[in-house]
Image (cartoon, rainbow, N blue to C red):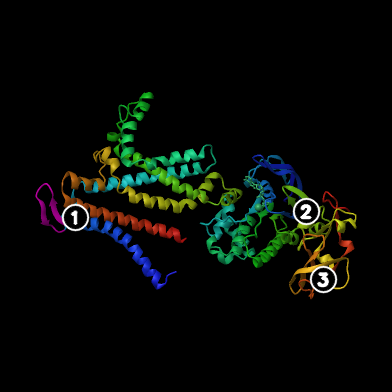
Amino acid sequence: MATQHSRSAARIMMAPAVVLLLGWMLIPLTMTLYFSFKKYLPLRGGDLGWVGFDNYVRFVSSSAFWPSVQTTLVIVGGVLLITVVLGVLLAILLDQPLWGQGIVRILVIAPFFVMPTVSALVWKNMFMDPVNGLFAHLWKFFGAQPVEWLSDAPLFSIILIVSWQWLPFATLILLTAIQSLDSEQLEASEMDGAPPLARFGFIILPHLSRAITIVVLIQTIFLLAVFAEIFVTTQGSFGTRTLTYLIFQRVLESQNVGLGSAGGVYAIILANIVAIFLMRIVGKNLDS
Amino acid sequence: MGQITLNQITKNFGDVQVIPPLDLRIDDGEFVVFVGPSGCGKSTLLRLIAGLEDVTSGDITIDGRNATEVPPAKRGLAMVFQSYALYPHMSVRKNIAFPLRMAGLDKAAQNAKVEAAAKVLNLTDYLDRRPGQLSGGQRQRVAIGRAIVREPAAFLFDEPLSNLDAALRVNMRLEISELHQTLKTTMIYVTHDQVEAMTMADKIVVLQAGVIEQVGSPLELYHTPRNRFVAGFIGSPKMNFLTGQYAAGYDAATIGVRPEHISVSPSEGTWTGRVGVSEHLGSDTFLYVDIDGVDDPITVRSTGEISARHGDTVYLTPDASKIHRFDKQDLRIA
Ligand SMILES: Nc1ncnc2c1ncn2[C@@H]1O[C@H](COP(=O)(O)OP(=O)(O)O)[C@@H](O)[C@H]1O
Ligand SMILES: [Mg+2]
């Protein structure tokens, strides 16, 4: 298709989109880099000049840094584990011919359409409230002391909320993957004497491996930036301060734009490491 | 051993009866071919025997044991699917070894059997490849290998050659026939291609809409088709059917003549017609001749070369001893 003429026409027509996207990415990135080398305290003197790598050193040497990295990893890992495991199970369930399939599928997908802020508020007030929450009532019904979810098990609570939001996404991708499995393969393995669990382990799970990798890749990138759920529930207290939340606090609560920007650069590097790592896995998967 | 008896089995999908009550006996060591047009229930029948579908009513007996309620893995049958159904993420070796692994054989015994099967099927060089890296014919052989290692009571094949190109199909046909000679195991083979049925079968089962039209050896079906459907389905090119005045002379509602039982002459004969299309294959010539009062052209097969051209008038003479007569119900008149 590519004559010289059509290629240059294509370039001209793509140019506005490319310029817009580049600007969209490059301007914030450049500004973050710019501020990260400055001492910039908007409420305490404004721009106080260049400081070299000072912000970078201070950001990682602060006592809050490593715990926040750990919290981030725990949340990302926990949510991935829950959504992938439950996603596979739900996908298998939804793949069975069952009554009211259409409605069940819509219900399963629904949480994905709820804004993170809203869903976190709903969970916080409707389910996890130690006085009026549904869980509290349930606990009381069985004669147990209601749990103060957000202070007693804050990390777990946040993982639960975020998992609830991302489960539909995982389920949807895994369901389409399961539906693409050739049913003759399952029948062949059945005739070969594989019991249900072996059919799952030897046929279904390997078939799903690529879809699982894709779910992990996409979710990781979004989960590294989880913010609203923490903001409306624990506000970063009780050991729920993730890297993203730490950066937010540095910029807005401590009004230290330079320090926050340096954190932002670290976050960019971290996300890219994860992305490269996962791209490799996906690439390997796609090759075979 | 591999003796299978179907006793009054039926199969319904919802309200639709795909297999009306059906009886069939398959003897040990036989090569049985189920043949019939697409959608006539061949696969369904095979899957009922395999246990992948439950019968709606009736009994299936395998080697004297009632197998109606026995799960597929326990019936001792191996199936080769149309799509081959190989496990894409396992090597050829692992694919073939899979049933052995499921049966709990140790690694050494697995390998010995896999390698023996690979040798028979010319797969030795490909054992470490994935199915995706094999050609269609090789995949087919892996699927057969996976069936062989189980040493089943019977092999079930569902249109195994339909995904191969014509030349390869002829090859694999021979290979499967040879395999049957070597193993002497019962084989049930489903196809819609009557050439495959004629060339491979000891016994052909002709099906139409789930009903067995006739069971018999290839030549029995060729020489004495029980009804018009079987007569038209078996044999290539198809049998010619004539009704009305042409049949009346033979005291029948319909008569059938195979293309190879009609002789052509430029000067004299029983029927007069005009040549439509002529196909020259060198060894044979097929003429499609239009004769008055018959809608479809009559196909004539002559050995050697015939210099008939489009529009020529020719005279056809059927071999009187090879004419098949059918009554109003399309049944054969003896
Ligand atoms: N799982 C099923 N549910 C409903 N109808 C089916 C099912 N499987 C097959 N059929 C119907 O049964 C008939 C026979 O199908 P099949 O045995 O696959 O035919 P064949 O293999 O001879 O082409 C067809 O009309 C088909 O539509
Ligand atoms: Mg079929």
Please, what secondary structure does the residue beneath circle 2 have? helix
Left or right of A83, for residue B198: right
Label 2 to label 3, Cα distance in Å? 31 Å
**Mark drawn on residue B229:** 2
Chain for numbered disc 3: B
- The structure residue drawn at horizontal position 62% and vertical position 59%, both measured from the top left corner, is B145
2 and 1 marks in contact (CB < 8 Å): no
Q: Position of residue A172 (x, y in %)?
A: 44, 46
Q: Position of residue B193 (x, y in %)?
A: 70, 59
Q: Residue furthest left?
A: A45
Visible residue check, residue B294? yes
- At 57% from the left edge and 48% from the top edge, which residue is drawn? A194
The residue that mark 1 highlights is A56
Q: Which image quarter is the N terminus of chain A in?
A: bottom left
Report the front residue among B232 and A65: B232
Q: Is residue B219 visible?
A: no
Element type at marker 1? helix
Image depth: mark 2 or mark 3 in front? 3
**Span shown in magenta:** A33-52
Specify whether disc 1 shares its chain with disc 3.
Answer: no
- Are the residues at dot 1 and dot 3 in contact (C-beta closer than 8 Å)? no
Q: Which three-letter amino acid code belongs to the residue tagged 1?
A: Tyr
Instruction: Give the SS element for disc 3.
Output: strand
Tell me which corner region of the image, top left, top right, bottom left or bottom right, holds residue B307.
bottom right
